[in-house]
Image (cartoon, helix red, strand yellow):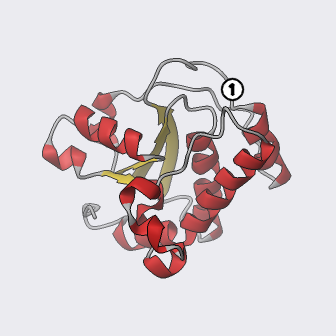
Amino acid sequence: MFRVMTVCTGNICRSPMAEYLLRRALEDEDLGDDVEVTSAGTSRWERGNPIDPRARALLLADGIDPSDHRAREFDPAWFADLDLVLAMDVDHLDELRDLAPSPQDADRVHLFRGFMDEDARGDTAETDPQNAGISDPWYGTDADFEDTERLITEALPSLVAWIRDHRTAGAPHR
């Protein structure tokens, strides 16, 4: 089993949206039995809380029921069981790499949108890691949540292709 975790700040907006959307994309490619997708947050602020109602509404509109989601804080001990850790923004990337117990564990941490090639990203400014993250929609409007969903969805084809190619043979890291 190849194990992937998406990580944002509170684990109520971006990372659960990415978790559920990535899980469905993998199932659509018949990879659901080979890949486990979970999510967590870098903080304990929202621990135990359900997904944000705005994120929930978008997922429900896509036919995904996230009602079982409960926020949890990332535990560095989980690195031992994870093949790929997907940070939703640069701050998460840096924090997760700092939490990694070894350089090999730090090498498993990537930006969620970091797997997109330049053609898929379109805007050349997006090739800069500082601009490749997904901003927190929590303080924003419904439109910000829609933008978050769009950015996640745009990254899925490249990410699913990478996972398909790397889920076996000891899960080599990018």
Between 106 and 114, the one lying in front of the other is 114
Q: Nearer the viewer, residue 57 or 171?
A: 57
Question: Which of the 4 image quarters holds residue 27?
Answer: bottom right
Counting every numbered tag in the picture gives 1
Question: Which secondary structure lies at badge 1?
Answer: loop
Instruction: Pick out the residue farthest to the right.
Output: 61
Viewed as shown, does residue 116 lie left or right of 153? left
Q: Is residue 23 visible?
A: yes
The quadrant in which the N terminus is found is bottom left
The 10 Å Cα crowd at callout 1, few under 14, some 14 to 19, many 20 or more, is some
Q: Residue furthest left?
A: 103
Pick the front one: 21 or 141: 141
Q: Which residue corresponds to the image point at 53% horizontal and 17% vertical from the top-left?
A: 45
* Horizontal arrangement in the rendering, residue 158 relative to residue 148 (left or right): left
Instruction: Give x and y (percent) for residue 8.
Output: 50, 38
Image quarter (top left, top right, bottom left or bottom right) of the C terminus: bottom left
Residue at (24, 35) in percent of width and height = 98
Q: Is residue 40 above or below residue 131?
A: above
Relative image position of residue 24 (x, y in whole percent): 65, 58
Residue 109 image point, x, y percent: 32, 49
Seen as rendered, the residue at the extreme front is 125
